[in-house]
Image (cartoon, coloured by chain):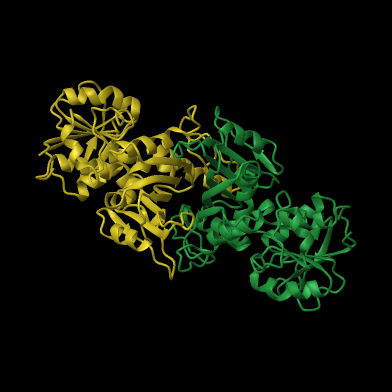
Chain colours: A yellow, B green
Amino acid sequence: MFKTVAIVGATGAVGNEFRTLIEQRGWDAERYVMLASARSAGREVRLGGRGYVVQELTDSSFEGVDLALFSAGGSTSQRFAPIAARAGAVVVDNSSAFRMDPEVPLVIPEINPQDIQNHRGIIANPNCSTIVLLMAVWPLHHVSRVRRIVVSTYQAVSGAGLRAMEELQRQTRDVLAGRPPRPEVFPHPCAFNVFSHNSPIDATGYNAEERKMVHETHKILHDQAIAVTATCVRVPVLRAHSEAVNLTFEKPMTAGQARGILSAAPGVRVVDQLDPPHFPMPIEATGIDEVLVGRIRQDISQPDGRGIDLFISGDQLRKGAALNAIQIAELLEPGGV
Amino acid sequence: MFKTVAIVGATGAVGNEFRTLIEQRGWDAERYVMLASARSAGREVRLGGRGYVVQELTDSSFEGVDLALFSAGGSTSQRFAPIAARAGAVVVDNSSAFRMDPEVPLVIPEINPQDIQNHRGIIANPNCSTIVLLMAVWPLHHVSRVRRIVVSTYQAVSGAGLRAMEELQRQTRDVLAGRPPRPEVFPHPCAFNVFSHNSPIDATGYNAEERKMVHETHKILHDQAIAVTATCVRVPVLRAHSEAVNLTFEKPMTAGQARGILSAAPGVRVVDQLDPPHFPMPIEATGIDEVLVGRIRQDISQPDGRGIDLFISGDQLRKGAALNAIQIAELLEPGGV
């Protein structure tokens, strides 16, 4: 059992979600340590009915910490996760800093829990878009091998944090009042607009978010041969990501088979009702644990019956981030955290 | 030259755009007739500095009309377009009523202007999502045959008319004020949400919007062999549609070749700047004639170099509806309308 749990990035969007989930899941650590940058230190956050003063993250923050949940960006993880691990904590890191490190397991508990055994103090939580995608793809792939994935995302602004969520609301108010939207967090207006994901683009023309979906899929599924292409797009939604997914299987797969497999998959809820129409929507995926999957249909562009189309919505802050990390921690302590 | 031009659906979102475009393009018909349902009759609309009282659409509305631009829904077109044609008008119809009729040409002037010659009084304007897609795909297909298209749409609410645009604004105000969004035009909330396109789904699992993209592509390109799958999704954007497109070519195609072809294509503007990032966005596609194309890259999931990914934005009310119809009319009267 983890006696002392630290949350790094305790005042952020994922940090808020960590505290909510720890309460909801009845963790009973003896001590919680709330850590953040100097800017947020001194603020009070609540967990389990009591208040905690947020402390500034320093090299000595991890004395006596058993579990450290990191969600404070890549450079903070890069610097402090090894310090926490050396101090004896197990780190579950939400950033991209260690995901592709061959010595760091990259884990979705429903998919590759066995990989956790090889950890050396740091376990990486996958990118939110990858988690949402693989929650639906893996159960199918497990039964019948997937050869190719074409995915287009409809990503909430929450991936860029609380300030981005505030920016969407502020800009939307401005546009409705006839004022021009002022972009601060994002390079482009997000109110009543969609734009290509704001992560760096390399010489291949893919942005970092898209490359994560490709490489993390290979690592988590232990299958470098799955061909993946992604187009990642921000939409004016607050906190759940949606994805339109086109799959090519090695062998024929019917929509009925896919629906059956997904209906039995852990962490997945099939929402695929034709009349009245009811399919996955980010507002319904918000705040719940399951990833919603629907629009399950045979792809008519692959006449040999090897194609399936899907539409998915999953809470970016929950299964896409905090919940998955919490589940990883619970895997480490099967007797209860 | 068309002496008398009727606009059917004169008070709607596309009707407004017809009037704007007729002014901007300097049409000089002798007479304009503004038609709408009984509900809108009596209202005044403006064109070229003067007001027109909207008349109720009846069987006798088309006496002396040379050109009738229809945008009042499928059932109105079904009933009144043949009447207008029998009265001697050429009908350019924005609805889906006649698009798949083998005797009715389905035309995008940049792509298949020759088809217009076979008209028998009615010419159909394609679905907005199809027009936006093919404006980018056709120039490539014309040079090197496209075998398969996988498209995911990010569709503005304007496709459902002015009331839908008002609904998005009203719901957004309600959500920002902490009130629940009330869906009236759409079956689901559109504020801060995305949802599967609200058109009927058939036994294949595809909705009508998706089927239009498949079948209209075959008809416009005169190529039944192009495999197409689509996932059509509404996003909280007012009036331009965006699309993430994955293409498979018969022969290898590089991103550089695709960019070169698209840069020279009529009606297309390449917006594909890496630093600072600048790609197609619906707020920049709004109110302009060109379809914006960017994120042009070699698809890494097709290692034989036969795949290209694109992201497109085009004004649904303009090139996706009114402008394309206006261009069809101008094709009919090359000497000037």
* Between A47 and B198, the one nearer to me in the picture: B198
Measured as percent of width and height from the top left, residue B31 is found at: 88, 64
Q: Is residue A182 left or right of residue B3?
A: left
Q: Residue B242, how many percent across, how many down?
A: 56, 48
* Picture quadrant of residue B129: bottom right
Compared with A16, B27 (above or below) is below
Q: Quadrant of the N terminus of chain B?
A: bottom right
Report the front residue among B126 and A39. B126
In the picture shown, does residue A155 fall above or below B14? above
- Image coordinates of residue B70 in percent, x first then y, are 73, 66
The residue at 50%/43% (across/down) is A170
Residue drawn at point x = 45 percent, y = 68 percent: B203
Left or right of residue B259, residue B204 in this image: left
Query: Can residue A181 be seen by looking at this rendering?
Result: yes
Q: In the displayed structure, would residue B203 be above or below residue A70?
A: below
Which quarter of the rendered picture does the C terminus of chain B lie within? bottom right
Corner quadrant of residue B122: bottom right
Q: State the residue in front, B57 or B319.
A: B319
Depth check, front residue: B137 or A284: B137
Task: Name the outermost residue toward the bottom.
Answer: B59
Residue at the (46%, 33%) spot, across then down: A207
- Asked whether residue B166 appears in the rendered view, the answer is no
Q: Is residue B212 left or right of residue B28?
A: left
Q: Residue at x 39, y 59 (%)?
A: A296
Query: Count of labels shown?
Result: 0
Q: Provide residue B182's location: percent of width, then percent of height.
A: 48, 64
